[in-house]
Image (cartoon, grey):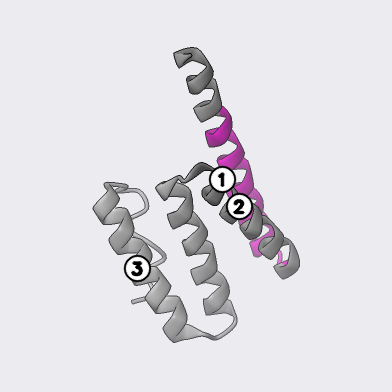
């Protein structure tokens, strides 16, 4: 049972790393549609697993897209909420957020 659960956690971590890397790559070359598709995949993973960490990462992607779209107040709000949630959950690596405000 523990071995199976460990394998599931490792598979989720691997999939998360892949999805976030792909999002960064598509974003760096201006492929908005692809960024949205992968952001939706990350959001779905967060909902399926109930992972607070994935929910925060998904929100950070939403923040970046809001910023790109010029919805600055929304982007700042998402950023602040994400940072606060990461801080509360003890995710120091995510507590830095996107840093929009």
Relative image position of residue 57 (x, y in whole percent): 47, 55
Report the side of 22 relative to 98 (left or right). Answer: right
Residue name at image x 56 percent, y 41 percent? 17
Q: Which mark is residue 35?
A: none
> Residue drawn at (55%, 86%), measured in percent from left and top?
70
Check disc 3 and report its element: helix, strand or loop: helix
Q: Residue at x 54, y 21 (%)?
A: 7
| Front position among marks 3 and 1 | 1
> Image check: 72 left or right of 95?
right
Residue 76: quarter of image: bottom left
Residue under label 2: 44
Quadrant location of the C terminus in the rendered image: bottom left
Q: CA distance from mark 3 to mark 1?
A: 21 Å
Q: Could you classify mark 1 by the number of other residues whose Cα lies within 10 Å: few (under 14), some (14-19), or many (20 or more)?
A: few
Dot 3 or dot 1: first in sequence order is 1
Instruction: Give the magenta part as a residue range.
Output: 11-31
Say which residue label 3 marks. Answer: 81
């Amino acid at each position: 049972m523990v071995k199976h659960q460990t394998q599931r956690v490792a598979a989720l971590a691997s999939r998360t790393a892949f999805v976030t890397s792909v999002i960064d790559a598509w974003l760096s070359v201006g492929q908005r549609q692809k960024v949205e598709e992968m952001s939706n995949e990350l959001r779905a993973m967060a909902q399926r697993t109930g992972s607070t960490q994935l929910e925060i990462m998904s929100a950070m992607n939403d923040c970046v897209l809001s910023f790109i779209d010029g919805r600055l107040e929304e982007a700042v709000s998402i950023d602040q909420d994400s940072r606060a949630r990461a801080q509360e959950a003890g995710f120091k690596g995510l507590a830095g957020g996107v840093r929009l405000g």
